[in-house]
Amino acid sequence: MRIIIQYIGVLILSTTAFAQDYSSKLLVNGYLHVGNGDVMETAVVGIVDGKISFVKNANAYTIKPSAWDTIIQLEGRHIYPGFIAPNSTLGLTEIDAVRATRDFDEVGTYNPHIRSQIAFNVESKVISTVRTNGVLISQATPRGGSISGSSSVMRLHGWNWEDATILNNDGIHLNWPLSISSGGWWAEPEPKSSNKAYTSQKSALYDFFNLAKAYSKTTKNDKFDIRLEAMRACFNGNKRVYIHADELQQLVDVVDFVNYFDLEYPVIVGGYDAHNITRLLSDAKIPVMLLRPHSLPQNEEDDIDMSYKLPYLLQQGGVQFCIQNEGDMEVMNARNIPFLAGTAMAYGLTEEQAVQAISLSAAEILGIDKEYGSVEKGKSATLFVSDGNALDMRSNQLFMGLIDGVFIPVSNMQYDLFKKYTKKYN
């Protein structure tokens, strides 16, 4: 059965889960943000079996209704690739204040074998509130210890964690020791001081990685060690090493560490002081998952808007980066990732550079860019349509969304309650 959906039809269907998935879909007359920095003001996007079959200018394309199961007229609405939430405990936490719902931190110091993938809760109520702002993919990331464990890249829709998995065990997460410690708290700060144990803590990491690298050169018939086995692909495969560090001394030492172990896929997570060593990071080809722009300055001498400007400074320095949202209440605040990019846009990035910072750039750093991150021929049809600019909270209003070509609900319990009580009290 062929269906041509106009505005009213989509508006009604988009408030609930779509009952049926059609094998071929045509999106017509949308303002396309490709995700790679390009735009197409009047685009037509063809989707067949979950893949993007073509992207063309709608003014130069003749629609053949009989060739499509579903044709959706977008009437100038904005098409975006699904936004990505890297380095997130989304799906691993439900209620921050309830310990039983926090499943991201295991006991122990070195836990590369701990897998966040199997703890991912695809039924999380929080996920639906994030998805309705266009965030369709996340990197479920463990926390704690010197090596927290292995993260996995997940779809934010599916029957279970297996169904939701895009890339399992994509990398291990290493928390670099602090070179400087600060006392007090944000309301009553105290002067910073050097971490006297920094050298010994750094040496312990070198020892563990030396052991892991030696183990990676052995055959699988040798004595099995579950921790070192999880590290094997970091040295002879495509598993990434995500190194969480912010301070200048940390970052310089991280570059030396990467060079010493000849890590093929290193990533810095945080990188607050990365703007001071852009040449070093660019030459070393180390990308940065930049801390959330909505953060306070970390140094007394910094500009008050330093965090806002960091994406632009890294862009100017030639460092590959994406924007992430680690911090207080990061699970519920994952919905704000489009607006973090919007802030970066207000402080130097162009609109399409800001879009790329939460789509294709994130996909490239995670290693999923062949399938996700942009609206291009041959890639997964993981995208959404917004009534307006998705980087502005006033106009980020989802009209429809697709993950791997499957329609997803674009409502959530909060919006449902809003409608319920609006109707009651008019």
Image (cartoon, helix red, strand yellow):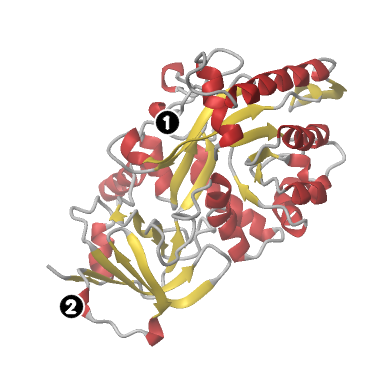
Answer yes or no: is residue 327 visible.
no
What secondary structure is marked by label 1?
helix
Q: In the image, what residue type sits under mark 2?
A: Ser
Total marks drawn? 2
Q: Say which residue appears at 37% left-offset and 59% top-offset.
A: 381
Q: Position of residue 309 (x, y in %)?
A: 74, 52
The residue where tag 1 is placed is 117
**Closer to us: 269 or 295:** 269
Q: Say which residue appears at 58% left-offset and 40% top-offset.
A: 325
Q: With 68 as the anchor, is 387 left or right in this view?
A: right
Q: With 40 as the anchor, is 165 left or right in this view?
A: left
Cα separation, mark 2 vs mark 1, equals 42 Å
Residue 400 found in image quarter:
bottom left
Q: Position of residue 89 (x, y in %)?
A: 50, 32
What secondary structure is marked by label 2?
helix
The residue where tag 2 is placed is 66
Up-down relation of residue 290 to residue 229 (above or below): below
- The numbered mark, 2 or 1, whose residue comes first in the sequence reads 2
Q: With 112 as the anchor, is 32 left or right in this view?
A: left
Q: Say which residue appears at 80% left-offset and 32% top-offset.
A: 253
Up-down relation of residue 416 to residue 236 (above or below): below
Q: Residues within 10 Å of mark 1 (few under 14, many from 20)?
A: many
Q: In the image, what residue type sits under mark 1?
A: Gln
